[in-house]
Amino acid sequence: MAVIEVQSISKNFGSLTAVDQLSFSVQQGEVFGFLGQNGSGKSTTIRMLLSLIHPSSGSIQLFGLPLKEHRNELLEKVGAIIERPDLYPYLTAREHLKLFSQVRKKQITTADINATLEKVGLSHRSSDKVQTFSLGMKQRLGIGIALVHNPELIILDEPTNGLDPQGIADIRHLIQYLAKEEGKTVFVSSHLLSEIEQVASQILIIHQGKKVAAGDTDKLLDPNKTIVHVTTLNDEAALLAIHASSFAGNLLPRKDGIYFMLPKHEIPMLHKAMVLADIALLNVESKNSLEDYFLQVTSNSN
Amino acid sequence: MWKIISIELYKIYKRPRTYIAFGAIAALIVVIQLGLKIDGESYAGFLMKDINDTLTVDGKVLNGYLVCYILLQLLLVHVPLLVALIAADMISGEANLGTLRLIFTTPYSRTQWVMAKFIAASTYTLLLLIWLAFLALFVSMWIFGTDDLFLMKSNYVVLIQGDDVLWRYVGAFIFASFSLLTVTSLGFLMSSMANNSIGPIVGTMSAIVFFTILSTLNIPLFSIIKPYLFTTHMNNWKEFFDLQVDANNEAIKGSILNVAKIKTSLIVLTIHIGLFVAASVLIVKKKDILS
């Protein structure tokens, strides 16, 4: 079942089209990565999914029901954090969770609140006012508010903002746990593409408000089209040797270094060939990452 | 609905800014009461200087009832500014903090949130008024005692018997609650249109000052709109302290000179409250939350 079904939504702010005829669907239990550069329309889209912004056209369905007509009923099943973790500085972490538990129809007990504080690593600071929190701690609390009522759909807009490497890893594990162990649907946007690559099973990339790529993460990152960056002590001499080798046809016409496109399993052979050709190799790096793919599709659409 | 009203009340209760107005009112009242306690007789003498030759007043002119009247005259002009501090921040303050996103993604409609916020802001306003009433009336009665209320109007004097005063204050405070709720709803309307706190607070205060000037200016052009301005009616709590007289020019105990004026003012203020709140709901419903 599609938990999110978006059909041709657009949003205009005066003459600016922030989101342009965007359509996509998110299936139950998926971790859906939503990518785009700053100003590409990600947050506008997420705000439309949460009815914070009214679409200029198009329709949004959550859990098979139109959001416009069933807003309150549908938002009961959704937990979200949107961009910055904006909270009440004069309230404590526990007070935030208590207040936002009260607006839910579900009975949320003190034990649930304690479990949420534990889940986001804030048990030891639960009685401190938010004004004393670091950005990372606020982000954790924001995620706690999104999770406290045990929602079926979790929308996380830049959930790793302000987190240290350990915090980022914790959120990654949390997303994986929520999807795999609890069967939640997670819609996540982040500028940390490597994080999305590790957690998302589906990816949607938008650019200037339009969809530029979408699909299974595995399929988008085609292993038969791996980009390999080779660093040598003397690129000029290396290129002469490469042109004379069987990998000449895989060489990409780039001026910023030596790049090949080839199937992933041929990388060891390339490595061996260059050593045999007496090329002074410093590094051979596979660039078949989401970041490369993202840069490729967004620059193509410019 | 009660859940989100209680959330809004809790947030007001926890905000340090809430207590500024309570502190300011207490400080002002205590200072005035102290001044009148120390040098009140000369103040009373100054008030009576024009009629001392023609009228002899027995009893205690400077009593708790008169002190309360003096305090209300001074404070009911300024309390709206204190009310604006909270009311004009109710929506815009959250937009500024970014927390509107949090509350507007809960399973309650924007109309419900706006109404909950208005009810919470109104509760705050009424509590502020009760605090004012307690300090200005009951503490003054305790410090200065009670007697007949002797008031100097522009071209006549009013003497209200001691046992005929208290209910008039109850009426005056109920009337004042309508005046202050009008200010609350105006602040609320301003708040719905902005994404920062300062603009609506200054805007509300400016609107009150602007319309007060229009209400007090005796220029024929403005006379047409005066009856419809809320500021024209806000100070009509004083009508509770004007009495009807009989054929012998004796004050009729328990009477009010111009009941119709009070009724008209209450109707005008209620209409303003309704319009301001309805406009706030419409604006917030249509608004894209971009903060």
Image: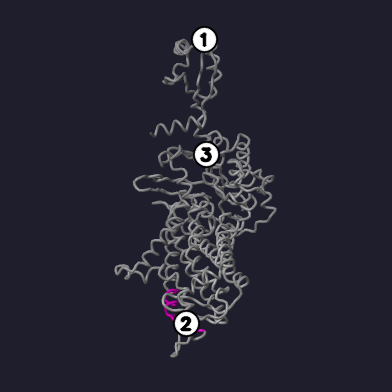
Q: Is residue B126 left or right of residue A7?
A: right
Label 2 sits on residue:
B243
Give the CA distance from mark 3 to mark 1.
42 Å
Q: Residue A204, position in %: x, y?
A: 48, 40
Q: Secondary structure at mark 2?
A: loop
Task: For label 2, count other residues whose C-alpha is less than 10 Å away and answer few (under 14), some (14-19) or many (20+).
Answer: some
Q: Residue B138, position in %: x, y?
A: 60, 71
Q: Residue B136, position in %: x, y?
A: 57, 69
**In which quadrant will I find the N terminus of chain B?**
bottom right
Residue furthest front as drawn = B53
Q: Secondary structure at mark 3?
A: loop
Is A253 or B111 nearer to us in this picture? B111
Q: Chain of mark 2?
A: B
Label 3 sits on residue:
A190
Query: Mark 3 or 1, which is nearer the eye?
Result: 3
Range of residues picked out in magenta = B254-266
Amino acid type at image mark 1: Ala
Label 1 sits on residue:
A277
Residue B170, label in figure = none
Amino acid type at image mark 2: Leu
